[in-house]
Image (tube, rainbow, N blue to C red):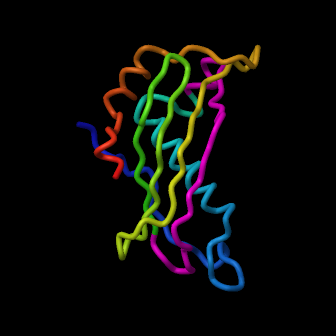
Amino acid sequence: MSVWTETFRGAVMASEYDPESSMNSRLYIERFDQATWFLMHTIGVTPRSIRQQGRRVAVVRQNFQYVRELRGGELVRIESGFIAVGRKHLRFLHRMFDVESGALIATSDVTAVQASLETGTTVALPDDQTAKAQERTITDAEID
């Protein structure tokens, strides 16, 4: 059994919400993008490490579900886990929560690959990254 990894914690700042005090949709995506990098870090993938390997991380599919809006001044946290690990892809789920109430705010289901900076084609994931991601795989029972 794996555990969810906290990958983001922050607040909705005044500069991040609209006139109705709701967080703008682009900011949900930015928060999930930040969470992705912290999740990737758990398996040894960082911006520096992939640059050194002549690679990049490419999101090939991403689905969002918005459950309720975040309002100005609310505290938010994101927890993340891998749900599928393939030879060339990683699929992971982010869940965003209101820190004070514990209510689910939004989810992001992502499939990502690594691609060669030289050729632009996908490359196989290194064995150590695959093994670490498999250790952090969340089961169906843990997703609910």
Q: Is residue 50 magenta?
A: yes
Residue 60 drawn above or below residue 100: above
Question: Tag count in the figure?
Answer: 0
Q: Measured from the top left, where is residue 68 in percent x and y?
A: 53, 72
Toward the viewer: 15 or 100?
100
Residue at 71%, 85% (x, y): give it: 19
Residue 137 drawn above or below residue 28: above
Q: Measured from the top left, where is residue 110 in percent x and y?
A: 56, 41
Q: Is residue 70 magenta?
A: yes
Residue 99 drawn above or below residue 142: below
Which segment is the magenta one? 49-75
Residue 20 relative to residue 48: left or right: right
Q: Measured from the top left, where is residue 44 in percent x and y?
A: 44, 28
Residue 129 relative to residue 118: left or right: left
Toward the viewer: 112 or 7?
112
Residue at 48%, 15% (x, y): give it: 126
Quadrant housing residue 140: top left
Q: Measured from the top left, where is residue 48 in percent x and y?
A: 58, 30
